[in-house]
Amino acid sequence: MKINCNTSLNELFKNAKETLDQIEEDEEFIVKDLFTGFEWNRIDIGNRSKLGAMFFNFSKHDDKLIIVGIGKTIQNQQKYRKLHDDVEIEVDNGELKEMKLQYKSLVYNSNEKLKNLEDINKDLISKLLSKDKKTLIEEADKDTNELYIQYLESISKIE
């Protein structure tokens, strides 16, 4: 379908949904990414905003829930992530649908936290490797002494 300034909002929305097949699982995207650069530039700014709202609503209410909103970009555009098909469940109950959405958000957030922990561990390891053994032993002794003092203080409070 050729997109121009006269393309209806419904046709634009249909095109965006069809393009989702090209997005990989766990890949992040914004609605603009579902169009080529020149196609996106042909869409009226007002229709871009309406299309973004339609797509956000779709992400919240689609029965398959294959995408989830994950926050905003610096330009205030909604970011999405395509989810794994292995957690896809057809639902017709609103409460179940909400639970499923919460589950998918939880899975996403857990994965993000794990990535952050990996980054923190890499940073700590690189800092440790940059220090000499004597400094590391001194810092470990200092930390051990502080923990021992805290332990003794806690015991004395109990007695």
Image (cartoon, helix red, strand yellow):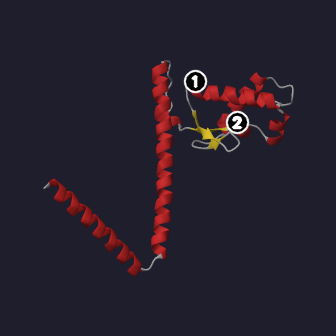
Tell me if label 2 and label 1 are in contact, CB under 8 Å: no
In this rendering, the answer to whether 140 lies above or below 59 is below
- Residue 143, percent across and down? 33, 68
In this rendering, the answer to whether 62 lies above or below 126 is above
Residue 62 visible in the shown view: no
For numbered disc 2, what is the local secondary structure? Answer: helix
Q: Categorize mark 2 by other alpha carbons within 10 Å: few (<14), some (14-19), many (20+).
A: many
> Which residue does the numbered mark 1 point to in the structure image?
61
In this rendering, the answer to whether 30 lies above or below 91 is below
Residue 64 visible in the shown view: yes
Tally of marks: 2
Residue at position x 66%, y 35% from top?
A: 20
Circle number at residue 99: none
Outermost residue, top direction?
93
In the drawing, does residue 25 fall left or right of residue 140? right
Distance Cα–Cα, label 2 vs label 1: 17 Å
In the drawing, does residue 123 fall left or right of residue 11? left
Q: Could you say which is closer to the camera, residue 89 or residue 130? A: 130
Q: Categorize mark 1 by other alpha carbons within 10 Å: few (<14), some (14-19), many (20+).
A: some
Quadrant including the N terminus: top right
Label 1 amino acid?
A: His
- Residue 78, percent across and down? 65, 37
> Which residue does the numbered mark 2 point to in the structure image?
31
Residue at position x 55%, y 29% from top?
A: 65
Quarter of the view holding residue 39:
top right
Quarter of the view holding residue 159:
bottom left
